[in-house]
Amino acid sequence: MPNPFNQQVIDEFRAHHGKVGGYFEGARLLLLTTTGARTKTPHTTPVGYYPDGGDRVIVIASAGGAPQHPDWYRNLVAHPRVRVESGVFTYDAQAVVLEGAERDRLFARAVEADQGWAEYQAKTDRVIPVVALHEIPQDGPPHIEAGSMGEALRLVHDGFRRELAIIREEFASSGSSLGAQLRVNCLTLCQGLHRHHAGEDLGLFRALADRRPDLTPVLDRLRVEHERIAVLVEELRRVVGERHADPTRVLPEVVRLTEELEAHLAYEEERLIPVLEAATAP
């Protein structure tokens, strides 16, 4: 894609915390900043990605089936440490080019999710690279591009809303079988929700309880809702993990989780964001 197009997407992505329209609307997109192989200067590119569980995501250097690898791929081969912007979080990552059976397995998983990857491979003689971006652990809380704690909370919530919307759309077009990538997408979401709620229970909620005893009923309700959502998450994990999982059976669990989670997020934002905004006001 031409650079002016890329810059337009980058600007929109950053202005709207990961939400863009046009060609990338409704897609999983990240901004990948690499170091120029020759120039040593930073270059940022919008790149589609797939969840892969844990602390890594997968990107594919297709370049639309062009005969040459994309510049961002050549850059990360020369300088594997990269910067990732998810729309909510910004973090450094180590890029690892996958090879052999692992590369083939993940490429096949991507093709199962989107036949476009196979079409790109058919257009070129090069083997399209698959790259894992491993998040590099950092000290302290994750970096969120937000002006306040209240805005940070809302952005994290919006990230979960966006991912659930994508997963529901994927189910709608999945046909009669539950593909491997869709399973991973669901399980990665489950893992992310568990980590987020555990972090709130042990961090944010404890801090608020110490400073604002009047919030005890609110925090107690939120903890109970965390427990209820955890039950729904485990049920989704169970049905997704079945060997011959039927999408028509899994989708109702996704819908249940979506509805329960949306009600929980809305209540938490209503009751906690004003408190967090007041705490960070000048």
Image: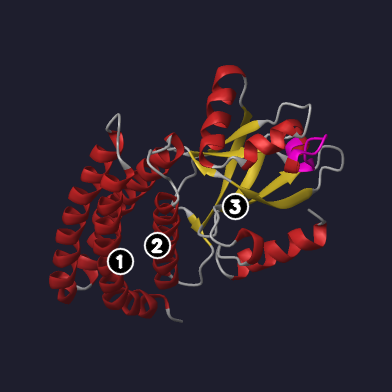
Q: In front here: 232 or 275?
A: 232
Q: Which mark is residue 30?
A: 3
Q: What is the span of residues highlighted in magenta in the rendered image?
A: 65-73
Residue 68 in the magenta stretch? The answer is yes
Q: Nearer the viewer, residue 248 or 198?
A: 248
Relative height, residue 192 to residue 258 (above, below): above
Instruction: Give the secondary structure at mark 3.
Output: strand
Quick check: is 28 in the magenta stretch?
no
Q: In this figure, which residue is indicated by the disc labeled 1? A: 262
Residue 167 location (% of width, % of height): 41, 52
Residue 146 image offset from top left, x and y in percent: 51, 68
Write the residue at 65% across / 42% down. Answer: 82
Residue 266 at x, y = what percent? 30, 72
Determine which residue is flagged by label 2. 161
What type is the residue that disc 2 sits on? Arg
Quadrant hosting residue 188: top left
- Which sits earlier in the primary sequence, circle 1 or circle 3? 3
Question: Is residue 258 found left or right of 165 in the rendered image?
Answer: left
Marks 1,2: beta carbons within 8 A: yes
Residue type, mark 1 in image = Glu
- In the rendered structure, which amino acid carries the disc numbered 3? Leu
